[in-house]
Image: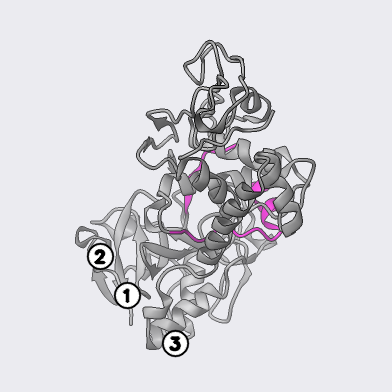
Amino acid sequence: MKPWRKVGCLAVLLLVCAIGCAGPMITVLSSASTIASNSSLGEDIGGSAPGIGDRMLTAYKNAVTGVADVVPKCRGMRWPILAGIARIESNHAAGHSVSQGGDITPRILGPVLNGSGVGGNVTAFPDTDDGKWDGDTVYERAVGPFQFLPATFRSYGRDANGDGAVNPHNADDAALAAAVYLCGNNRNLGDESQLKKAIYAYNHSDAYVADVLSWIHRYDAAAQNPGEIGQATGKARTVLAAALSQRGVPYSWGGGKPKGKSTGICCSPSGQDGRRVNGFDCSGLTLYAFAQVGVTLPHRADLQAGYGTRIPASAGFGALKPGDLVFYGSPTADSTIHHVGIYLGNGQMINAAKPGTNVRVDSLTSMADYAGGARIL
């Protein structure tokens, strides 16, 4: 039984570290080593797109990394695929609240599948969950942002956010279930023909496949062309281009030099030995990008906060311009700053987030303790 298409329709754990560079550790099914193995397949979980809320986008990105635990040989999974499905099924849970832990309220329910013809359904589906997820003890209803039938979700659902429950009305659990379903028997979703087959398996409709694919392609374009680099000029544009050119390079604890990526040092709070990874940490990426315009920055986020003109957190994101540094920690004490990124525009930063990830584009709100910025140029 396939998911039913609804017709018409974080806890952030901060790793504070001596080098002053860490990112949000999202509690998901996968471990840092799993994320690293998924990244080795070339998937890029950076970028964002208009119309997708930050928490839903986080769920899609979590699922990209988490599916490696469940379907290790699945290839080509990326957040635009999940976003394309969710856009058609629930418009990214628009009109509903998504909690920090991913729970969606009110619940998203499809029409009662009693064969009445409502929503195009002419076949009755008797209840299989005693109304647990769909509130109906007689017939089935599609549930959650990915509109699974309860019986289907029971087969594919996983506890993606580590809260001890498997719930189709949780954004993380639902997104991971969709990723597992689409991966099937080790599909390569980077192959358009296999991707089409996966979408068709989700809903046996050629029109549905075409609709979802059109959204996937839009989101792919957004992921590849994030932010407002086109609005940046001069040295700021050079800095942004340099940082974006490193997308996909692994995070390395203590890694990064003025001339590019490098091995780092041992060891991060999560246990990464940077000496074994050739890449960047957060302040290594920023010092590299600014070195391309002749600016020398120290290899520590808290010390970088002392350069240029400080932009207070109280001024809000609107005070930032593309090319500014953005910091996380206490807005009143630079000594507490533990993370730095480069503002790209449109509420996004170029970011070397944490061990096990690659350089990518993240929302400024992907971390909770924004401490302001600094204008270097």
Q: Is residue 355 visible?
A: no
| Residue bearing the label numbered 2 | 318
Q: Nearer the viewer, mark 3 or mark 1?
A: 3
Q: Residue at x 45, y 44 (%)?
A: 92
Mark 1 or 2 closer to N-term?
1
**Circle 3 residue:** 293
Quadrant in which residue 98 is drawn: top left
The residue to which callout 1 is attached is 307
Residue kind at label 3, given as amino acid type: Val
> How much space separates mark 1 and mark 2, taking CA atoms?
20 Å
Dot 1 amino acid type: Tyr
Q: Does 47 lie within the magenta span?
A: yes
Specify few, some or many for label 1: CA neighbours under 10 Å numbering under 14, 14-19, or 20 or more: some
**Residue in the foreground of this view, choosing between 318 and 87:** 87
Residue at the location (62% across, 66% down)? 249
Please give the range of residues in magenta. Answer: 23-49
